[in-house]
Image: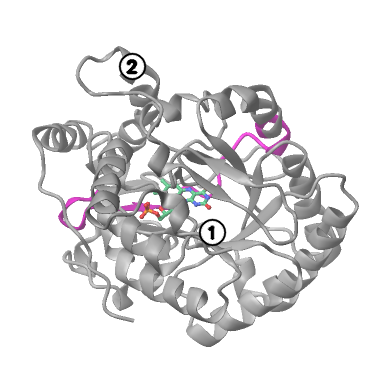
Amino acid sequence: MKSPINHDYPLSKSDRFLALIRKVFHKYPEFRHHSFQYVARFSPWIPCIGAKAVSHLPLKKEIAFADQSETIFLSSPIILAAGANKGAKRISDYANVGFGGISVGTATRHFRIGNTHRPRLGFIEKDRAIHNSMGLNNDGVEQIAKRVKMQLSKAHKKGLSVGISIAETPGLTEENEKLKDVLETFAMAYAVADYIEVNISCPNTGEDRLDLDTAFAEKLFKSINEFRSTQKTRKAVYAKLSPDLSTPHLQVMVEMLLQNGVNGLVLGNTYPTAKLNSLALMSPYEELEVLREDGDKGGLSGRPLYENMCRSVSFVKENYPTLSVMASGGIDHGYKIFDLLKLGVDAVQVYSVVAFRWMAPHAMNRELLQQLRLHNIDSVMEFNHH
Ligand SMILES: Cc1cc2nc3c(=O)[nH]c(=O)nc-3n(C[C@H](O)[C@H](O)[C@H](O)COP(=O)(O)O)c2cc1C
């Protein structure tokens, strides 16, 4: 493939205002980070920022599946990635800032406090990147599924599809116990969400990732498939993989996932800190203090992930065209979304950009619309790959 263009955007006055907020609250990065929920909630009352759900017909995206899994309806191909709304609270607020879907969680079987060291989050300004080692803090799948169930129809009315991201409870060693744990979590999420994302690639719990344990991953997805065949409604299942997998490893995983009825991939998660040398960062590794204090346990997100992510996406779409792909990693411009749709992705998932770009999804929706018009493409649905 041609090298992807890491399209950049000029910083607007509002983006500079966001930079100021990051500076003022630099000692409280988690507070700064979580404040996005208030932007989503109160934006309709802030004048002049155009905060409303997406209603441009050309941006609508429907993801249909050959195995008759329920279609995913998105009012824009931009989904808020897992980790931003871990607790599934006030889901439909996120439509105000321009999202077309949201993956809530990651949920585990029970409540988790996450990693106890601080800071667990840091901004790397020069690279417009974020480092985190949150450690899967969440309220547990029962609470999260209950909240999704209560809010789903309101979210649909505002044009949002809602996925639940689930993961294993870190630290379980006995195989059957581990399997039971994930399957219970999966079943509770499956009962209520529009789609399920199985996060097998979290780098920061201190435990081995499941995408590195191919034998266990195979047992897990086989059991998930058996469970799905007993259910009245079939829903789409995505596996979220790590961006650091080698091509042969990625190939083995993809073939196993296809054999077990998985509909798609989220490509990918944060990039493990311990392997950051393989990414082109402007900030030297030695200077990334926030990143190092947790013993290199965390992961990086944001702009530096983009090129690497595009290579994995192209590889998968060229070799496994029927697999649905949601691209994630450094997407911060509507032109990038256009390029990815051309590569065959069904949607994109973004997170870090909301910390660096004011009302980022609205800005990216506008840029995507511009590209569609420029290329005489009537709607996102014209990039239909299934
Ligand atoms: C603070 C933070 C927390 C995250 N938590 C999760 C999580 O719980 N589950 C998950 O699958 N991904 C999580 N991610 C990864 C994002 O969902 C996303 O895949 C990644 O950040 C790459 O996209 P981006 O470059 O647009 O941020 C988290 C990312 C950040 C920055």
Residue under the point 39% across and 44% down? 118
The three-letter code of the residue at mark 1 reads Cys
Name the quadrant containing residue 275. Answer: bottom left
**Is-magenta flag for residue 143?**
yes
Residue under the point 54% across and 81% down? 319
Name the quadrant containing residue 177. Answer: bottom right
Q: Which residue is mark 1?
A: 202
Please report whichever mark, 1 or 2, sits nearer to the chain's N-terminal start. 2
The front one of 201 and 174 is 201
**Observer able to see residue 302:** no
Q: Is residue 11 left or right of residue 163?
A: left
Mark 1–mark 2 distance (CA, rounded to whole Å): 34 Å
Span highlighted in magenta in the image: 123-144
Mark 1 Cβ inside 8 Å of ligand 1: yes
> What colour-coding does the image apply?
one colour
Q: Is residue 49 left or right of residue 331?
A: left
Give the vertical position of 66 relative to 115 (above or below): below
Mark 2 Cβ inside 8 Å of ligand 1: no
* Front disc: 1 or 2: 2
Q: Is residue 267 left or right of residue 161?
A: left
Expressed as whole percent of the image width and height from the top left, the position of residue 1 reads 34, 81
Expressed as whole percent of the image width and height from the top left, the position of residue 340 reads 37, 63
Badge 1: how crowded within 10 Å, few (<14), some, or many (20+)?
Answer: many
The three-letter code of the residue at mark 2 reads Pro
In what element is the residue under mark 1?
A: loop
Residue 44, label in figure: 2
**Observer able to see residue 25:** yes
**Is-magenta flag for residue 94?**
no
Q: Are marks 1 and 2 in contact (CB under 8 Å)?
A: no
